[in-house]
Image (spheres, coloured by chain):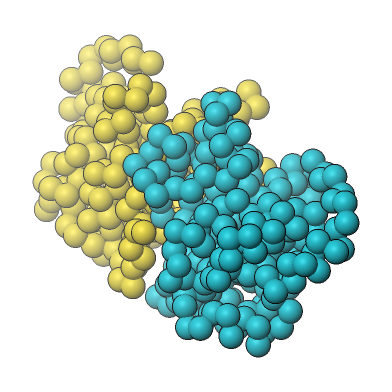
Chain colours: A cyan, B yellow
Amino acid sequence: MRMRKKKNAESRLLACEDYLLKSREDLLVYRDKMPLELEIGCGKGGFICQMARRYPQRFFVALEVSTSALITALETAKAESLANLRFINANAVHLPELFESGEVSTIYLNFSDPWPKARHFKRRLTYRLFLEKYCSVLTPDGKIIFKTDNRPLFDFTLEECAALSLPVTDLTYDLHNSSYNADNIMTEYEKNFSSQGFPIHRVVIHKKAENTVSQT
Amino acid sequence: MRMRKKKNAESRLLACEDYLLKSREDLLVYRDKMPLELEIGCGKGGFICQMARRYPQRFFVALEVSTSALITALETAKAESLANLRFINANAVHLPELFESGEVSTIYLNFSDPWPKARHFKRRLTYRLFLEKYCSVLTPDGKIIFKTDNRPLFDFTLEECAALSLPVTDLTYDLHNSSYNADNIMTEYEKNFSSQGFPIHRVVIHKKAENTVSQT
């Protein structure tokens, strides 16, 4: 689904630019030693704004490539003066350029584009090269929390984790009816799909331990 | 599917009794320091007999509760004088009584009963209490190789592994069309289902490493 282009996009973006990270120095100033968490593909920012409200002692950075979606997210953050949340108008490919190795404690992937055509598998945000990029910026006990309603994308993700020997925990094919649902924050998309009766799949992916398992 | 009772079951079983393990001492004599591999629920023994032929330097033990199925397996092994294969007429529950901790290098679970009713989940051979029993007899780098055409059972298995933080590798939803298929031995059941176009799911489950990942 392509988003309609926002009116006055440029001026609206400019009005919120203090919520956009422009340099690594920006990050260091704003973050101020708080644990760092990332959302990749935050869309209009419903999830990450809620996280920033709920956890004022953590610092959140959200990546989004769509400028139109990002404007809504930026305007929400600015309207509420959320001090522990900043945005980057970039793609996940740039992650290792944006963050230092071992700097990020948690990465959130919510309802990422499934890229259903087989030949597009390398574009999926849980393709092994992306997972490797995520792991490179995660702390040793860091984790990736992945949620989707798309079953083929979920299955693909589990195959990719196994191929890289990444440990997974907290796996459920029906998050809202599982014991893992207690502190779940629903995205807009999730509310919509869940209300139509579609189950939400969720898994927590861990960085590989030092004492690692090799493939057979 | 219940098997038809075999004619003269008792006398046929008696005729092959040298292929039945009756005591732990039997195992120690026959095994003679070879690596030990188990199949749980071998049915008529097509898979495990093929394994015993292909790998004469490994020792195989197969468990089967159905006496009727076991007779076919025993008669095959005896007819071919397979020296590195023995059977036990028992249930997986008894595993820790039959084997010592850290003794088994590989456990095979092929097309186990899916027990599709939700209330029967504790009977599935990949229910967490079974997985814990398997791990208790596995060597530190031991593994469980699980194959099924039943998707709900496969999904359940992945959830159970994640709940116990057991590392998984070599995960595929379509074994016969994957890069993992090179040395696959097909069971009778697998040939049948696969020829009807049903994909075979396969995963390798590892014993938890010392440096373990805790659940979030």
Q: Residue furthest bottom?
A: A25
Residue B161 visible in the picture: no
At horizontal 85% and vertical 45% (from top left) the residue drawn is: A4
At horizontal 19% and vertical 39% (from top left) the residue drawn is: B93
Identify the image quadrant of residue B138.
Answer: bottom left
Q: Is residue A84 left or right of residue B97?
A: right
Residue A119: x %, y % from top left: 80, 49
Viewer-nearest residue: B174 or B75: B174
Q: Is residue A112 above or below residue B88?
A: below
Residue B3: x %, y % from top left: 34, 15
Viewer-nearest residue: B57 or A87: A87
Q: Is residue B18 left or right of residue B145?
A: left
Viewer-nearest residue: A65 or B12: A65
Q: Is residue A3 above or below residue B152?
A: below
At horizontal 52% and vertical 38% (from top left) the residue drawn is: A200
Residue A121: x %, y % from top left: 74, 52
Point out the image quarter for the N terminus of chain A.
top right
Q: Is residue B167 left or right of residue A31?
A: left
Residue A51 visible in the picture: yes
At horizontal 47% and vertical 56% (from top left) the residue drawn is: A204
Identify the image quadrant of residue B197.
Answer: top right
**What is the count of numbered marks?**
0
